[in-house]
Amino acid sequence: MDFGGGSGFRFIALPTNETWVNYSAAPAVGLDVRVSMTNSVKLVPGLRMLAIDDSGRTGWLVRPSVGLQWAF
């Protein structure tokens, strides 16, 4: 950008790295299913859905999971 007047002065915009964090309340739902494998071991698949709102863009974050449950 030249400011004119023959001064030869130029404005140079340097790139910036900005990070914004938005903390707000939003719904979260989840489901776990216990599937018996033996008398003491169960497979536990799960699914979590979290509502997100990032700079005006809204949607759902889907997080699958799996685990083992051991009973004595």
Image (spheres, grey):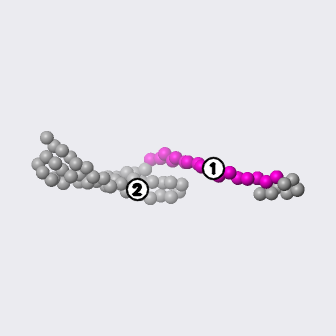
Residue at the extreme left of the image, as rendered: 39
Which type of secondary structure does the marked residue at label 1 adopt? loop
Disc 1 residue type (three-letter): Thr
Q: Where 64 sits versus 69, above or below? A: below
> Camera-side residue: 15 or 44?
15
Q: Where 56 sits versus 24, above or below? A: below
**Residue 54 in view of the camera:** yes
The range drawn in magenta is 9-25
- Label 2, label 1: how far apart the Cα atoms are: 28 Å
Q: Quadrant of the C terminus?
A: top left
Please tell me how many numbered marks the rendered image carries. Answer: 2
Question: Magenta region's main secondary structure?
Answer: loop
Identify the disc placed on residue 44: none
Q: Quick check: 38 left or right of 57? A: left
**Does the magenta portion include 68?**
no
Where in the figure is residue 55, as x and y percent of width and height?
54, 54
Identify the disc placed on residue 16: 1
Disc 2 residue type (three-letter): Leu
Where in the figure is residue 36, as x and y percent of width and height?
15, 53
The structure residue drawn at horizontal position 79% and vertical position 54%, both measured from the top left corner, is: 10
Identify the disc placed on residue 61: 2
Reading the chain from its start, which is encountered first: label 2 or label 1?
1
Q: Where 60 sits versus 18, above or below? A: below
The structure residue drawn at horizontal position 82% and vertical position 55%, both measured from the top left corner, is: 3
